[in-house]
Image (cartoon, rainbow, N blue to C red):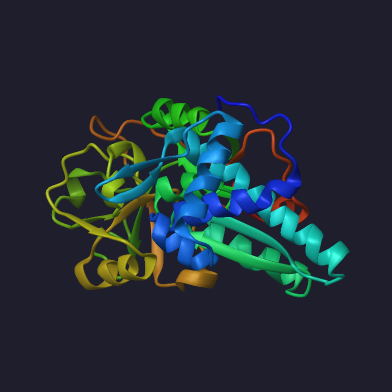
Amino acid sequence: MQGNLKGRSFHDTDTDEYAIAVADTGSMNEAARSLFIAQPSLSASIRELEQEIGIELFKRTSRGVLATPEGEEFLGYARQVTEQYRLLESRYIEKKNIRRKFSVSMQHYSFAVHAFVEMVRQFGMEEYEFEVHETRTWEVMENVKDGRSEIGILYLNDFNRKVLTKLFKENGLEFHPLFDCGIYVYIWKGHPLAECPSIGLKELEGYPCLAFDQGKYNSFYFAEEVLSTYEYKQLIRANDRATMLNLMRGLNGYTLCSGIICEELNGSDYCAVPLKRGKASPEETMTIGYICRRGSAVSVPGQRYLEEIGKYRTVQ
């Protein structure tokens, strides 16, 4: 990030909070109201902050006040600084015994949710406040970049690796691989093809392929399913895992996944059948891993969470 951050001290958190409020509301007027200060005073504080750090944080558009790319990067750090300052203030100045936070974002993986459950069980709820976000690929990256989540769980393969790695670098993120896995067809056990030793794409043409909707970032590279460029004869997009499971039962739908089954959360009515290799589906590998902010240390609950996910390395 260009600009001058030298000399900024942690007591500058008021102006950082002003910038965060503007970003969250998308409006100077709304931000001023939420902060209980006059709008001209807020605008002046933002201008002073921009002059101090040497970058433009916001642009006024027809949709309101939007953060610039440099502003987004600054806000990611500002959120972390203000959160840490509140922790210091509460614990050492106000003498409060407040709980620390741990948050993780992930693509729609039941095994990643189950690993979170196991981690929370080990830590309990007395010292930590936990958050889990099962969401779209772009939002996984945004949450980690902005400091809303410490860790983001997603996958890379030969198709999306170059594009996503470039985005990680541009957004100050690092990808760390956890394990590799093959490609499976995920269906319910009552599906006509459920007993097959393997299933080819040709055999699946009579059934709807199910894919997670990626919203305005509905690029092939952000797809949570491999072979996203294949021309499926039937395709249904959904935005949550419960709906996916219902469509599998109701319409004999299927999705392409890592093959890691988590019966503890999804129940025992579903199975993963190896995808048959062919011209349209050459040998493919998914690398499951996590992203974090570049150079950041993983917290104790984060380390335990990754240990729990690592247990699935052999469950395929």
Residue at 59% over, 54% down: 17
Residue 284 or residue 72, whichever sits in front: 72
Residue 134 or residue 126, whichever sits in front: 126
- Quadrant where the image shows the N terminus: top right
Residue 157 or residue 29, whichever sits in front: 29
Residue at 27% over, 50% down: 63
Expressed as whole percent of the image width and height from the top left, the position of residue 3 reads 58, 26
Say how many tags the image has. Answer: 0
| Residue 266 falls left or right of residue 124 | left
Expressed as whole percent of the image width and height from the top left, the position of residue 169 reads 52, 28
Residue at 27% over, 45% down: 218
Expressed as whole percent of the image width and height from the top left, the position of residue 277 reads 32, 36
Q: Is residue 171 above or below residue 151?
A: above
| Residue 158 appears in the picture as rendered | yes
Q: Is residue 269 above or below residue 84?
A: below
Expressed as whole percent of the image width and height from the top left, the position of residue 88 reads 80, 58
| Residue 181 appears in the picture as rendered | no
| Residue 114 falls left or right of residue 97 | left
